[in-house]
Amino acid sequence: MKALRFWNERAETMSADELAAVQLEGLKRTVRHAYANNAFYRGRMDALGAAPQDVKTLGDLPRLPFLTKGDFRDTYPLGLLCVPQADIREMHMSSGSTGAPIVMAYTEADLAQWAECMARCQVMAGMQPGEAFQIMPTFGLFNGGFGFYHGARRLGLFAVPASSGNTARQIALMRDFKVKGIGSVVSYAARIIEMMDERNIELPDLKVGIFGAETFSDEIRTRVEARLGITAFDIYGMTETGGVGTTGADCAARCGIHVWSDQYITEVVDPATGASLPDGEVGEIVFTSLTRQAIPVIRYRTSDLSRIVSRQTCACGRTGVRIERITGRCDDMLIVKGVNFFPKQVEQALMEIPGVLPEYQIIVEEREGVTDIRIHVEAQEGVTGYMVEKHLKEKLGFSPKGDIFKPGTLPRGEGKAKRVVRANAGSAGLPPCNVGDAGSAGLPPCNVGDAGSAGLPPCNVGDAGSAGLPPCNVGDAGSAGLPPCNERLGIRS
Ligand SMILES: [Zn+2]
């Protein structure tokens, strides 16, 4: 049988004219649907003096109001729903770091649309019907696990729904079932590699990795590909657009993310003013869905920063718009001593230092209004903090403090890696708490700089503590009868 190059060749290779006609029809339909069936959308459009019949061409899109993450939160749980609740067949939700969660609801047709987008991504990555695909994001409210699953079912893959965690079992599954492709966050691939190295394991059947939910540098991609013997793809999508893969992925030609342009219109706007930016300029990515029913998005501001790289046909034969892999998020940008940068740039610079490993954290400390940065990074023997400081100074123009950790000692979570940790001034009356540990003495887990859980204040590494508590040091056995505070207990299975 001839290998599939496209899942939906017609949709993926439409001419520009055909695509424009499909987009205009989808836009008109979506705006009419949202206006007729949802009070929030109707209120927003009325307030701006915009009516569905005003949308006559694609150029009318900027006349419509934006939708933001805040709007999703303010309308929790189902204030953006445009169909009767009885038509919902599935939901997903992302917790985010602050405020109410973000909910996406799916009708039967929305689930089919998601499966279609995911199947396109999986074929674009080289997966073929009948091949085994291991799904390593969590199956639950987070959309990752089910997204890969719906796509795998649609495409006819052998789905291995491993979900997250238990790295030893993940590796055994891949080996025993001759898994060809994996889906996960790239930081989890790094964890698999660690265990393969420790135990001297090879996975000769593996050929494809599809990684989402985290931005990652080309340097990390190259390392993961070399050790796993795979081609790695960057998949894009979020709860608000309908989940992983809905807004596309990159192809083997590596020239940007192919946004499924018959399904979503892409705009790039100035994050400060909302003004449309020309192709090539970096700004905030804004999506309008063209076929979604339950919760369509009209001009959704993603907070993701990127630019349109091309509208020409790609070497792979796909048409539609291509955007650069995401640089960072508007709210991720760090400013230290007047220098602006994104975590991904730190990663890129770190990975250029020989002996530095892919596990790192950027600790942001705010003291008396001054922001300072420390880099915690795992490295092989011989790498010093000075080497890290010097290289980052050259690459990024500022000199953070570099702390070197032995391989396997930084905290590891199960989902998205927590790369940026905000630390601030201590906590009141609490015993030391373990970084990345499940806590001790009956305390709930607590993460560095994290607001903790169960209403506990943050617990900071290296902080002198407060309210008369002894210092809480990483790797310290604790003191004064308090439970140990040990960063070496990061979850590793
Ligand atoms: Zn391509």
Image: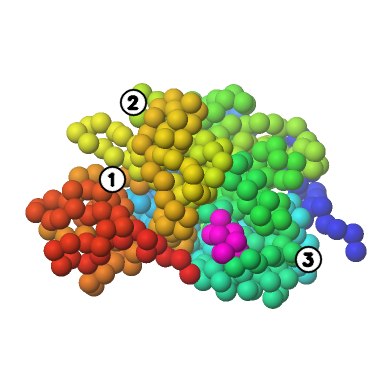
- Residue 476 at x, y = what percent? 27, 58
The residue carrying mark 3 is 129
Front-lying residue, 266 or 385: 385
Report the residue at 62% width, 26% height from top.
Answer: 279
Q: How crowded is mark 1: few (under 14 residues within 10 Å), some or many (20 or more)?
A: many
- What residue range appears in magenta? 190-198
Q: Main secondary structure of the magenta part?
A: helix
Residue 337 numbered tag:
2
Q: What element carries label 1?
A: strand
Quadrant showing the N terminus: bottom right
> Which amino acid lies under the numbered mark 1 shown in the image of this protein?
Ala
Dot 3 alpha-carbon crowd within 10 angstroms: few under 14, some 14 to 19, many 20 or more: some
* Amino acid type, mark 3: Pro
* Residue 214 appears in view: no
Mark 1 lies on residue: 423
Residue 166 appears left or right of 176: left
Q: Callout 2 environment at 10 Å: few (<14), some (14 to 19), or many (20+)? A: few
Which residue lies at the image location 25% right of the left edge and 49% below the top edge?
462
Question: Mark 2 or 1 closer to N-term?
Answer: 2
Secondary element under disc 2, as helix, strand or loop, is loop
Name the residue located 57 percent from the left edge and 25 percent from the top edge: 281
Give the spatial CA distance, label 2 vs label 3. Answer: 52 Å
The vertical placement of 74 against 339, above or below, is below
* Residue farthest right in this picture: 1
Frontmost of labels 2 and 3 is: 2
